[in-house]
Image (tube, helix red, strand yellow):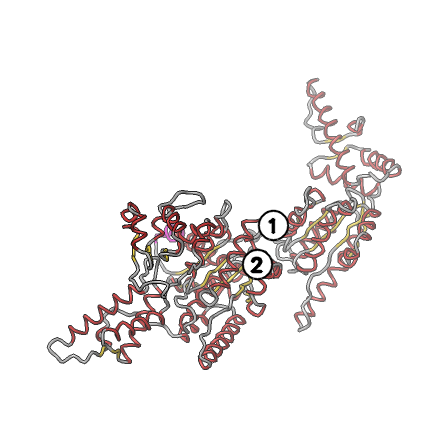
């Protein structure tokens, strides 16, 4: 006995469902021994459905429970909203043992369906007409949106072509053969794979990446042909990682890849869906999975491009971020070959992100990691020229020379946030703004960019020469041993630089310093001068000094110190990081977060070798204990400079320098008095002796006493003109 009598399914559209539901019990019985097919069921679910809401389908489920498996109930609807409804209702999901997610038809699927429809109507396609129809269907697939009709569209196209056929043969004998002329819809010319590659080759830089992509495409095409020979269909299962700083062409390259994969038939559309964390992670439980599902749906037939993908999961307790990754990984597996994912971001962060998750590591193969390096100054200049050429501007030769210097400086000062092509775009727009002002003042118009249109950099006129920085060092009072040590270092580096010019290996500045000495011995001042010296020598692009200490580097909670220290180090890139009282980082207990700061610092000193200099400063004995606390510190800090206490004569010179800088003078006998004063202080000094700071404190006390003396003289009616800028011995009486 047959399980069911052969009957036609009872088809109910959502718009008719309310009428159907009025007599649900009898209508349900009428479908017995058959199929109850409810189309557009998504329209029966409230928009933004959340679990527990009452829907129009609930009464249907009651009937299904009363009459299990008879009739067979089929719900059909669009994925958006309906998928979420099913996932949010375990009870509903259990009622339907088979859930099918039907993808949009590919161009090849549509062609097969069209050929079958022509056959059903006794028509055949000429080979030229079939080729033309295939191109037309590809065009429809590439431009599809949420209203894409799939099979309905195919039927419509076939009917139009047949109608055109009858118009063509009007009055002639019918041969039922469709010709290219019967396909009237305009078909845009398709670019070949080689034409797209030529555009890729015109992109500035990226030479290694271009070569790698060509090799990858060749390999994929061979795999595709192998599959065809064995009667199988090749599915594109490759997903890529683009590593690099902003503006290195990652998004542009992704678009070109989409076009290439579409041209060789591996992706139906080759379009790009660009997202980041803000578009992939929701704000409440259950929202994230829905968002990612929709994005993957949108990316079918193309590429899902995730910028700064490493931010998807920001910490171990980031459940929403983990949900986005889990949902994405499942879709990458379930829809293998239907879309590609390109994850992009900074090199270190992305490598750490991918390798930390086994699921990600298995989907993003190591051989599919592309490193897009920063553009060189010459390449950045070429990008500027392309912007100008694209807008029909001519760049004056003198302007090109000035541009080259501006771009070289921009490149030297770059950090991890350097925008590459975006920086050049900003520079180009600044030039146009300055040019507009120039032309308006001159009351002329020309399509030329001249030297005056190039913005001045903040460095112009400010950069000190090596001679000037050394002169500044030598003018400091005392510090004979320090000056000698730095002069020897400069001589060594200059000779190394000469060797590299003569073809030797270029020297990378990988020198870090320990400054040992009591407070006020000039450590910070020398650090600032040293930064200027290295900049003047071209060894540090910025030459700025970042001053920090334990309170800036060490946080109060687990996990915060590393990010806090990293942020400080990032700010020092291209310059000098000066850590005062560095020994305090190693002075805590075994659980102290200072150790985390040291570990983070050591790793960055290794990873960013030559990109910045660290100077750790503090008392001699304490700094020795600091170095002994971690073997890595001793090997990283290769230069130790001792800052001796200032002797009385040097302290006297410092005092006189402060007086001169103030535009004042000292009375007779003051110099001898000051020397004796500093001799007494020096002989009684202890660990807290503040050297130059002690001199500064005494000088400021003297100024206050002198001010009190001058005011008193003025109140007596005495002329103070001759004494207002003079310091006398009496001004030291209470200092």
- The correct choice, above or below, for 371 with respect to 696 in the image is below
Q: Is mark 2 on a helix, strand or loop?
A: loop
| Magenta-tinted stretch | 437-443
- The correct choice, above or below, for 688 with respect to 352 in the image is above
Q: Residue sitting at 73 percent across and 38 percent down?
A: 658
| Quadrant into which the N terminus falls | bottom left
Can the viewer see residue 244? yes
Picture coordinates of residue 198, whole percent (x, y)? 43, 73
What crowding class fits label 2: few (fewer than 14 Cα within 10 Å), some (14-19), or many (20 or more)?
Answer: many
Extreme-top residue of the structure: 716
Q: Earlier in the sequence, mark 2 or mark 1?
A: 1
| Quadrant into which the C terminus falls | top right
Disc 2 target residue? 346
Q: Residue sitting at 32 percent across and 58 percent down?
A: 147
Q: Residue 315 carries which label?
A: 1
Picture coordinates of residue 707, whole percent (x, y)? 71, 26
């Amino acid at each position: 006995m047959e399980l069911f009598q052969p009957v036609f399914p009872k088809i109910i559209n959502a718009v008719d469902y309310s009428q159907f539901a009025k007599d649900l019990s009898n209508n349900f019985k009428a479908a017995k021994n058959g199929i109850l097919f409810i189309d557009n069921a998504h329209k029966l679910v409230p928009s933004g459905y959340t679990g527990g809401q009452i829907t129009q389908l609930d009464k249907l489920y009651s009937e299904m429970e009363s009459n299990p498996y008879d009739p067979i109930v089929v719900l059909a609807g669009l994925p958006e909203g309906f998928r979420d409804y099913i996932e949010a209702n375990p009870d509903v999901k259990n009622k339907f043992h088979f859930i099918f997610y039907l993808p949009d038809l590919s161009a090849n699927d549509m062609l097969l369906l069209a050929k079958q429809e022509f056959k059903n109507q006794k028509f055949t396609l000429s080979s030229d007409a079939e080729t033309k129809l295939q191109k037309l269907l590809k065009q429809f697939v590439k431009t599809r949106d949420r209203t894409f009709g799939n099979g309905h569209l195919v039927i419509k196209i076939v009917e139009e072509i047949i109608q055109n056929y009858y118009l063509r043969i009007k009055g002639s004998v019918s041969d039922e053969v469709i010709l290219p002329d019967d396909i009237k819809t305009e078909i845009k010319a398709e670019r070949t794979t080689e034409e797209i590659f030529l555009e890729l080759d015109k992109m500035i830089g990226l030479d290694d990446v271009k070569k790698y992509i060509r090799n990858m495409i060749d390999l994929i095409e061979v795999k595709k042909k192998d599959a065809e020979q064995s009667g199988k269909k090749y599915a594109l299962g490759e997903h890529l990682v683009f590593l690099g700083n902003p503006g290195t062409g990652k998004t542009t390259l992704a678009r070109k890849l989409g076009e290439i994969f579409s041209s060789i038939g591996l992706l139906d559309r080759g379009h790009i869906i660009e997202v980041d964390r803000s578009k992939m992670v929701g704000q409440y439980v259950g929202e994230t999975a829905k968002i990612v599902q929709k994005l993957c749906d949108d990316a079918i037939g193309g590429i899902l491009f995730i910028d700064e993908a490493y931010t998807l999961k920001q910490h171990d307790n980031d459940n929403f971020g983990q949900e986005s990754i889990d949902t994405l990984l499942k879709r990458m597996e379930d829809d293998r070959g239907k879309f590609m994912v390109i994850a992009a971001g900074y090199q270190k962060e992305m490598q750490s992100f991918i390798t930390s998750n086994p699921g990600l590591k298995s989907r993003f193969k190591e051989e599919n990691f592309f490193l897009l390096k920063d553009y060189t100054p010459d390449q950045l200049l070429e990008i500027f020229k392309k912007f100008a050429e694209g807008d029909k501007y001519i760049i004056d030769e003198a302007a090109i020379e000035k541009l080259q210097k501006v771009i070289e400086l921009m490149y030297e000062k770059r950090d991890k946030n350097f925008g590459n092509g975006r920086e050049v775009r900003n520079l180009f727009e600044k030039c146009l703004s300055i040019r507009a002002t120039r032309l308006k003042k001159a009351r002329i118009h020309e399509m030329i960019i001249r030297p005056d249109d190039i913005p001045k950099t903040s460095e112009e006129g400010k950069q000190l020469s090596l001679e000037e920085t050394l002169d500044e060092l030598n003018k400091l009072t005392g510090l004979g041993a320090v000056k000698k040590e730095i002069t020897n270092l400069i001589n060594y580096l200059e000779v190394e630089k000469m060797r590299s010019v003569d073809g030797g290996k270029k020297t990378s500045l990988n020198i870090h310093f320990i400054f040992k000495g009591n407070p006020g011995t000039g450590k910070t001042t020398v650090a600032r001068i040293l930064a200027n010296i290295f900049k003047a020598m071209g060894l540090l692009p910025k030459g700025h000094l970042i001053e920090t200490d334990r309170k800036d580097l060490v946080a109060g909670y687990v996990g915060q110190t590393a990010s806090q220290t990293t942020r400080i180090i990032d700010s020092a890139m291209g310059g000098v990081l000066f850590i005062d009282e560095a020994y305090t980082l190693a002075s805590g207990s075994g659980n102290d977060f200072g150790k985390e700061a040291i570990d983070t610092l050591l790793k960055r000193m290794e990873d960013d070798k030559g990109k910045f200099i660290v100077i750790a400063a503090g008392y001699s004995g304490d700094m020795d204990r600091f170095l002994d606390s971690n073997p890595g510190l001793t090997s990283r800090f290769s230069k130790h400079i001792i800052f001796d206490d200032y002797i009385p004569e040097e302290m006297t010179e410092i005092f006189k320098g402060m007086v001169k800088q103030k535009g004042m003078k000292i009375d007779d006998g003051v110099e001898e008095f000051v020397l004796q004063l500093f001799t007494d202080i020096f002989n009684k000094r202890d660990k807290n002796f503040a050297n130059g700071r002690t001199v500064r404190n005494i000088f400021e006390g003297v100024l206050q006493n002198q001010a009190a003396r001058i005011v008193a003289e003025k109140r007596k009616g005495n002329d103070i003109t001759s004494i207002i800028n003079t310091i006398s011995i009496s001004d030291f009486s209470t200092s």
